[in-house]
C-alpha cells in the first residue's frame, strides 16, 4: 500500500468539508462537569443511527456518512434505573425512532458494575459479541473512558489504554469516541 495512491474512507461525521470523526480512529471529547460532553457524543450516535431526514434540526449541521454503521454505546457511570435508560431513549428519539423501538444497528450496555480492573476486558467482550452480529463498521462511544483504568493520570497506564483501544480499532473495524472529564478547577483531563 505504501507504493499506491491512498484512497481515504469518507469520514463518519463531518462539518462541511472538515472531517470530524474519521473511520478507524480514536476521538476524544474532554470538558468540565456540566459542559454537555455526553450530549454531544450521544448526538453523534443519534445522527449515525438516523434513517430519516426528519431529525436534521438536532444535528447542528454535522453530516454523516451514507454507509451503514452499527452504533455501540458503553457506559461506565450512569445509574441503571433512570440515567442510562433516559440517555438511550434520547439517542433513539433524536435518531427518529420511538422510545419503544429497538434500532437494529444500536447496541448498548453498562459496565458500571464490572470491577475496574476487568472493564477493558468487558469492553472487548461486548465489542466481540456485537461484531459477531453485524458486518457493518462499529462506532463505539465509551462514556467515561477514565473509568476503565485505575489511574488515568499515570502515563504508562493511559498509554496502555490507548494501545489497547487502537488494537480494537484495527481488529474489529471500530471507531472510538471517548468522553473524558476534566479535573475540577483545572484544564487537565482526569
Image (tube, helix red, strand yellow):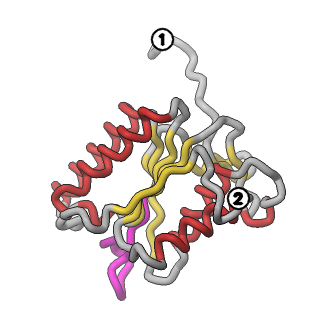
Residue drawn 59% across the image and 56% down it: 45
Q: Earlier in the sequence, mark 1 or mark 2?
A: 1
Q: Residue furthest right?
A: 54
- Residue 30 percent location from the top left of the image: 44, 68
- In terms of secondary structure, where does tag 2 sit? loop
Residue 33 percent coordinates (x, y): 44, 82
State the separation of the CA atoms marked 1 and 2. Answer: 45 Å
Q: Is residue 5 above or below residue 41?
A: above
Q: Is residue 182 magenta?
A: yes
Residue to which mark 1 is pinned:
3
What is the tally of numbered marks visible in this picture? 2
| Disc ID at residue 29 | none
Query: Going 19% across and 55% down the picture, which residue do you hit?
Result: 118
Q: Is residue 40 above or below residue 1?
A: below
- Which residue appears at 28% of the width and 66% of the height? 147
- Furthest residue in direction top, as rendered: 3
For the record, the magenta segment spans: 177-190
Left or right: where does residue 97 sit relative to residue 107?
right
Residue at 47%, 38% in the rendered image: 24
User: Dot 1: within a 10 Å radius of its alpha carbon, few (fewer than 14), some, or many (20 or more) residues?
Assistant: few
Q: Quadrant of residue 76?
A: bottom left
Residue 49 is left or right of residue 123, and the answer is: right
- Is residue 112 located in the magenta-colored stretch of the structure? no
Give the percent coordinates (x, y) of residue 154.
17, 63
Q: Main secondary structure of the magenta part?
A: loop
- Disc on res. 97: 2
- Residue 179 screen position, x and y as percent: 43, 64
How crowded pointer 2 is (Cα within 10 Å; few <14, some 14-19, many 20+) is rated as many
Nearest the eye: 185 or 117: 117
Of residues 10 and 116, the one nearer the viewer is 116
The answer to whether mark 1 and mark 2 are in CB contact below 8 A is no
Amino acid at each position: 500500500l505504501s507504493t499506491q495512491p491512498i484512497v481515504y474512507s469518507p469520514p463518519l461525521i463531518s462539518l462541511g468539508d472538515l472531517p470530524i470523526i474519521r473511520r478507524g480512529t480514536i476521538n476524544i471529547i474532554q470538558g468540565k462537569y456540566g459542559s454537555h460532553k455526553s450530549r454531544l457524543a450521544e448526538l453523534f450516535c443519534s445522527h449515525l443511527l438516523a434513517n430519516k431526514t426528519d431529525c436534521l434540526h438536532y444535528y447542528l449541521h454535522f453530516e454523516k456518512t451514507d454507509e451503514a454503521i452499527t452504533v455501540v454505546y458503553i457506559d461506565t457511570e450512569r445509574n441503571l434505573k433512570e440515567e442510562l435508560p433516559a440517555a438511550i431513549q434520547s439517542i433513539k428519539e433524536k435518531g427518529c425512532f420511538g422510545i419503544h423501538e429497538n434500532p437494529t444497528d444500536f447496541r448498548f450496555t453498562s459496565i458500571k458494575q464490572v470491577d475496574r480492573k476487568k472493564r477493558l476486558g468487558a469492553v472487548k467482550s461486548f465489542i466481540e459479541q456485537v461484531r459477531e452480529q453485524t458486518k457493518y463498521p462499529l462506532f463505539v462511544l465509551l462514556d467515561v473512558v477514565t473509568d476503565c483504568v485505575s489511574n488515568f493520570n499515570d502515563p504508562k497506564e493511559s498509554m496502555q489504554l490507548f494501545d489497547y483501544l487502537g488494537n480494537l480499532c484495527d481488529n474489529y473495524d471500530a471507531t472510538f469516541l471517548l468522553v473524558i472529564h476534566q479535573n475540577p478547577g483545572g484544564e487537565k483531563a482526569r
